[in-house]
Image: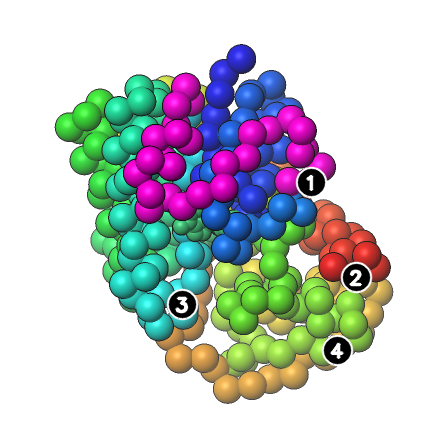
């Protein structure tokens, strides 16, 4: 059986990649330090996978993790812009040095392909829309700079060392298992958890700022396509829904799904917030054969159902 390594596999996106791999008959190993990842995210597949608790900054751990793997899905990171601003050195060590460490060990172990979780943050605040992979990157935070440098390292390793690499620039991912509690929580889990408790969501600014949301199951599917598509090697590819949605519409859709009528509360805009974001996903279509299948409302329904259940279970 083919073996895949998922770093950060106990996290939100990584655990969904684990699910998709198991469904396609892969053997799966997870490397995670459980800093933000949770054992509960893997409880349903516990016996089917191998879990290594360890740090991507540790060469010996990375070596053990990649042994025998055909593909690495590198999700492990400190995925937070504000944390990277507060701690550029610490986040650099995990997000960039950790990536170079994983690449080095993967190459030495003969891994065929390395798929990297990059981010739409690298586009910065350039007003040009939609975002295309050929645009000049304009990182505005240490986090974005670390992801961009990671992409460059992938390219260098493919050129110099022959390992196939693919960087996927995720836009705003949402779905079950996304942490609503962290102070850096994303907008959808924040809105849903507040609104499930009957509290109106808070919008920073006028609510007309837009995002390109994509359901986590679709991101997992894109990762599997990126591991297989021959033409993907050496590429950087946007992964998104390819549609813009503003925060007022988001709150309205959650109200609809909940059968509620909670009017948002407005607060001053947050400095450094990107105004608009939407992806051109023609590369994902052409190179990966990727097409988002689930409607936004259906993704939201599945997500709300999960938060409801987690709430009922006291989680
Ligand atoms: N969620 C999004 O919308 C989004 C958007 C763009 C990019 N990304 C990227 O996708 C990836 C997954 O993000 P997520 O939203 O699932 O976050 P997450 O925090 O749920 O997952 C990250 C995982 O990495 C693990 N980890 C952190 N530091 C580690 C270390 N030093 N060694 C080993 N494991 C470590 C954590 O325990 C966690 O399980 C990240 O690389 C993130 O930067 C996420």
Asked if residue 231 can be seen in this view, the reply is: no
SS of the residue under disc 3: helix
Could you tell which of marks 4 and 1 lies nearer the N-terminus?
1
SS of the residue under disc 2: loop
Determine the CA span between mark 4 and mark 2: 18 Å
* Residue 228 vs residue 297, the one in the foreground: 228
Pointer 4 residue? 199
SS of the residue under disc 1: helix
Please state the extent of the stretch shown in magenta in the rendering.
Answer: 42-70
Q: Determine the residue located farthest toward the bottom in the rendered image.
A: 268
Determine the CA span between mark 3 and mark 1: 28 Å
The tag on residue 314 is 2
The image shows residue 167, relative to residue 22, as above or below, that is below
**How many numbered circles are shown?**
4
The tag on residue 83 is 3
Determine the CA span between mark 4 and mark 1: 31 Å
Could you tell which of marks 2 and 3 lies nearer the N-terminus?
3
Residue drawn at x 22%, y 23% is: 162
Could you tell which of marks 2 and 1 lies nearer the N-terminus?
1
Q: Position of residue 312 (x, y in %)?
A: 83, 59
Could you tell which of marks 4 and 3 lies nearer the N-terminus?
3
The image shows residue 19, relative to residue 176, as above or below, that is above
SS of the residue under disc 4: loop
Local crowd size for mark 4, using a 10 Å CA cut-off: few (<14), some (14–19), many (≥20): some
**Quarter of the C terminus within the rendering:** bottom right
Q: Determine the residue located farthest toward the front in the rendered image.
A: 60
Local crowd size for mark 2, using a 10 Å CA cut-off: few (<14), some (14–19), many (≥20): few
């Amino acid at each position: 059986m083919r073996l895949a390594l998922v770093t950060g596999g106990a996290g939100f996106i990584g655990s969904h990649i684990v699910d998709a791999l198991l469904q396609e008959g892969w053997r799966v190993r997870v490397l995670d330090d459980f800093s933000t990842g949770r054992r509960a995210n893997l409880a349903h597949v516990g016996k089917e996978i191998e879990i290594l608790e360890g740090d991507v900054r540790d060469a010996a751990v990375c070596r053990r993790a990649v042994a025998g793997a055909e593909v690495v899905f590198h999700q492990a990171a400190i995925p937070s812009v504000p944390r990277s601003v507060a701690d550029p050195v610490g986040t650099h060590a995990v997000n960039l040095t950790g990536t170079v460490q994983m690449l080095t060990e993967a190459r030495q172990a003969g891994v065929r392909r390395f798929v990297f979780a990059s981010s739409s943050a690298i586009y910065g605040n350039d007003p040009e829309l939609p975002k295309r992979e050929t645009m000049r990157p304009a990182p505005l935070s240490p986090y974005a700079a670390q992801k961009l440098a990671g992409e460059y390292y992938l390219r260098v390793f493919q050129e110099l060392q022959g390992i196939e690499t693919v960087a996927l620039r995720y836009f705003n991912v949402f779905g079950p298992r996304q942490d609503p509690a962290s102070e850096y929580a994303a907008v959808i889990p924040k809105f849903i958890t507040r609104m499930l408790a009957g509290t109106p969501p808070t919008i920073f600014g006028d609510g007309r700022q837009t995002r390109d949301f994509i359901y986590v199951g679709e991101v997992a599917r894109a990762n599997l396509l990126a591991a297989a598509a021959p033409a993907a090697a050496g590429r950087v590819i946007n992964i998104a829904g390819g549609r813009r949605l503003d925060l007022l519409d988001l709150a309205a859709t959650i109200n609809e799904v909940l059968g509620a009528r909670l009017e948002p509360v407005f607060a001053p805009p947050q400095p450094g917030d990107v105004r608009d974001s939407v992806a051109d996903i023609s590369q994902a279509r052409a190179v990966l054969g990727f097409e988002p299948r689930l409607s936004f409302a259906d993704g939201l329904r599945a997500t709300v159902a999960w938060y409801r259940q987690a709430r009922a279970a006291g989680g």
